Amino acid sequence: MKILILLSAFFLCISANAQKSYLITYKGNYLTDLGFLSHFGNPVFIEDDSRLVFNDSISYFFSLQKNENRFRKKIYGQQMLDHSMYFNKRKGIIESVFTKHDVQDNYLVYDSTKVVNWVLLDQTKIINGFTCFAALTISGDNDSTLAFYTKEIPLPFGPDRYNNLPGVILEIYDQYLDWHLLATKIDTDDFTISYPKKYNYISQKEFSLQEHVIYGKRRVSSHPKQH
């Protein structure tokens, strides 16, 4: 059963004031659609910039929207940004945001972190001055994901759902999604990670069971009947 919750400011913010915190900006690109080609017959890739802010205990990942203010902020996570996500290291859960304009249709969906069988490799490269090590995982469909992480920031965070390596991930090649992400800037400051004030907090299993109802309601609200 979905629960609409209102958290007090004390529980809303997980402050990094007592911890060293980071803000990583990634430059990304991905294939728009299988078989979709440009006028010249080449695959079309879309650029998708994103950011990861984190401290010792939690991370928050989100895409940068077009024309969005790119200046650094002190607090992240207050707004419901569709497909943004939190990774709570202590609880071992991922919390994904699914949102619409109506606050009743805002969802924070929690799930346990997936076990990824990373194979740590000896290959290294330098990214933004950090020595990074390679790690590889291969899915049951033989699709591979190659990550480069740095032990100089020994926290298990990374962009999107890529995580649980011995250091922060600064680069990802995802074969299945045709997605490449590369850290282009790494800042440190007293950033704070916050949660929005109102949302429906439900499990991934429950969200999946209700998904057709939720998205059906979204389509109806997006296309009201004409009189």
Image (tube, rainbow, N blue to C red):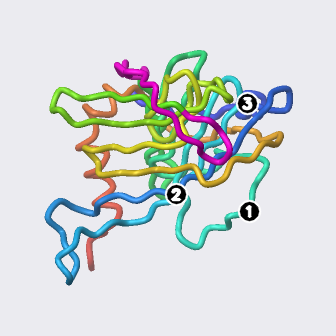
Sequence-wise first label, 3 or 1: 3
Please say whether residue 131 is one of the residues in the magenta stretch.
yes
Image x and y of residue 205, in percent: 31, 25
Q: Secondary structure at mark 1?
A: loop
Per the model, the C-alpha gap separating discs 3 and 2 is 26 Å
Identify the magenta region.
112-132
Marks 3, 2: nearer the viewer: 2
Q: Earlier in the sequence, mark 1 or mark 2?
A: 2
* Residue 126 inside the magenta-drawn segment: yes
Q: Residues within 10 Å of mark 2 (few under 14, many from 20)?
A: some
Name which residue type carries label 3.
Answer: Ile
| 151 displayed left or right of 142 | right
| Residue at which label 1 appears | 71
The residue at 85%/32% (across/down) is 17
Viewer-side label of 1, 2: 2
Tag 2 secondary structure: strand
Q: Look at the image and tell me in which quarter the C terminus lies.
A: bottom left
Q: What amino acid type is highlighted by mark number 1?
A: Phe
For badge 2, the amino acid type reads Lys
Circle 2 is placed at which residue position?
27
The N terminus - image quarter: top left
Closer to the camera, 133 or 105?
A: 133
Residue visible at 45% across and 47% down? 83
For mark 3, does the 10 Å Cα neighbourhood hold few (<14), some (14 to 19), or many (20 or more) residues? Answer: some
Residue identifier under label 3: 14
Name the side, left or right, on which 78 lies relative to 207: right
